[in-house]
Structures are given as C-alpha cells and as structure tokens.
Image: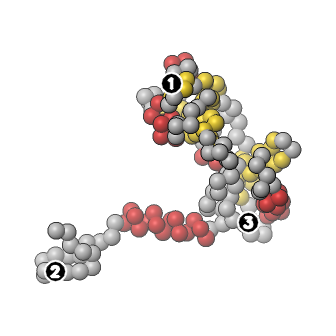
C-alpha cells in the first residue's frame, strides 16, 4: 500500500512529495497562457499581443498575395540539413516519420504537415545534423514505404530568415489574420 501524500499513518513515514517534474510542467503550461508570445497557435502565429515598444523574433512568409507569421520555422536549427518528404499517407504521424528515419545517427527532428481543414497528412520534413547521413538517407529512403505509401524525398529549402517585428507590424499581421480567419485558403 502506498502512502497518501500529506498524511502520516505512522511516526516513521515521511509524507511523499508531489512529483516535481509534473509540477514544473503544470506551472509552465499555466504561465504560457498568460505570457504574450509564449504559446504558438495552430496556424503558426504567436498567441498574444505585443506591447508597444516590444519586439518579437519571427519568420514572415509570403504567398498568394498574403503575408503571415510562422514561428514554427524557428524550431529548426539553420545548420541542419533538411529533407522534404512527399506523398505521405494519412496514417503517418510525427512519431511514425521519426521512427522511419531514426536509424541514421545524426537524425534530429521529423515533422508532418497536415491540411488545416481536413487534417490529412500532406507532406513532411526530416532534419539531420551530418551531411553524410542526410545524403545516405536521401539515397536509401527515397521510394521506401513509410506508412501505406512510398515517399518521395527532395532537398528542402534551408533558408529561414528570422526578423524582429515591432508593435505596429504585429498589429497589422493580427488584423490580416482576423480578416482571413474564416477563409479556407
């Protein structure tokens, strides 16, 4: 029988402390709700307003006449060598993709990109710290089955240009996001 934290059934038993790791994780999760820019929403933008005079590091993306903020690109180290993984089946998750490539010693990260509306897997990215493993994986894994389909691999564009935006640009991006919120693409 395990002792209940905070209760003492005998004089020789000390109370069992709460799991410190779970406590720390819980505190961080609560704090991220209140700290502007600490939480990243589903669309890749920062969740929170930027105070006047404040700056935030982000990546601005452009396409189809729109400009948006994508902080998920800051998670990738610019020195890593990235592969684009195309033709992913819907059963592939980040873990499945990582397990397919973790046989290479310098494997760093895998990410599956899903369609915003349907939730279906579209494509993914895999990163390596060593160029030899990058080339070996490209050669060996191109056309191999990951999930239910053979994947097509290409070299991904490694150019990530982080910029610091101020209050005015953040406000303009937020207004643009609200305007296009209900449009599918």
Q: CA distance from mark 3 to mark 1?
A: 44 Å
> Which quarter shows the N terminus?
bottom left
- Which sits earlier in the primary sequence, circle 3 or circle 1? 3
Q: Is residue 177 positioned above or below 17 on the image? A: above
Q: Is residue 102 positioned above or below 55 on the image? A: above
Question: On the image, numbered disc 2 is attached to which residue?
Answer: 9
Q: Nearer the viewer, residue 20 or 77?
A: 20
Residue at left 48%, top 69%?
27
Q: Nearer the viewer, residue 71 or 95?
A: 95
Q: Which mark is in front, 3 or 2?
A: 2
Q: On the rendered structure, is 30 left or right of 180?
A: left
* Residue 31 place in picture, x, y as percent: 55, 69
Question: On the image, numbered disc 1 is attached to which residue?
Answer: 145
Residue at left 23%, top 80%?
7
Q: Which mark is in front, 3 or 1?
A: 1
Q: Secondary structure at mark 3?
A: loop
- Which sits earlier in the primary sequence, circle 1 or circle 2? 2
Give the number of the disc on residue 50: 3
């Amino acid at each position: 029988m395990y002792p209940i934290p905070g209760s003492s059934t005998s004089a020789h038993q000390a109370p069992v402390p709460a799991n410190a790791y779970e406590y720390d994780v819980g505190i961080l999760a609560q704090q991220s709700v209140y700290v502007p820019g600490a939480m990243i929403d589903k669309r890749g933008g920062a969740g929170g307003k930027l105070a006047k005079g404040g700056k935030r590091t982000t990546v601005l993306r452009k396409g189809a006449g729109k400009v948006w903020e994508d902080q998920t690109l800051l998670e990738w180290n610019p020195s890593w060598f990235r592969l684009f993984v195309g033709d992913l089946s819907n059963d592939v998750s980040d873990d499945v993709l990582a397990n397919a490539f973790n046989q290479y010693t310098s494997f760093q990260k895998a990410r599956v990109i899903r369609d915003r509306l349907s939730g279906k897997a579209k494509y993914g990215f895999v990163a390596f710290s060593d160029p030899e493993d990058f080339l070996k994986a490209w050669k060996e894994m191109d056309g191999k089955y990951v999930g239910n389909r053979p994947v097509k691999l290409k070299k991904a564009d490694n150019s990530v240009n982080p910029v610091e935006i101020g209050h005015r640009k953040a406000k303009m991006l937020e207004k643009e996001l609200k305007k296009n919120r209900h449009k599918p693409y």
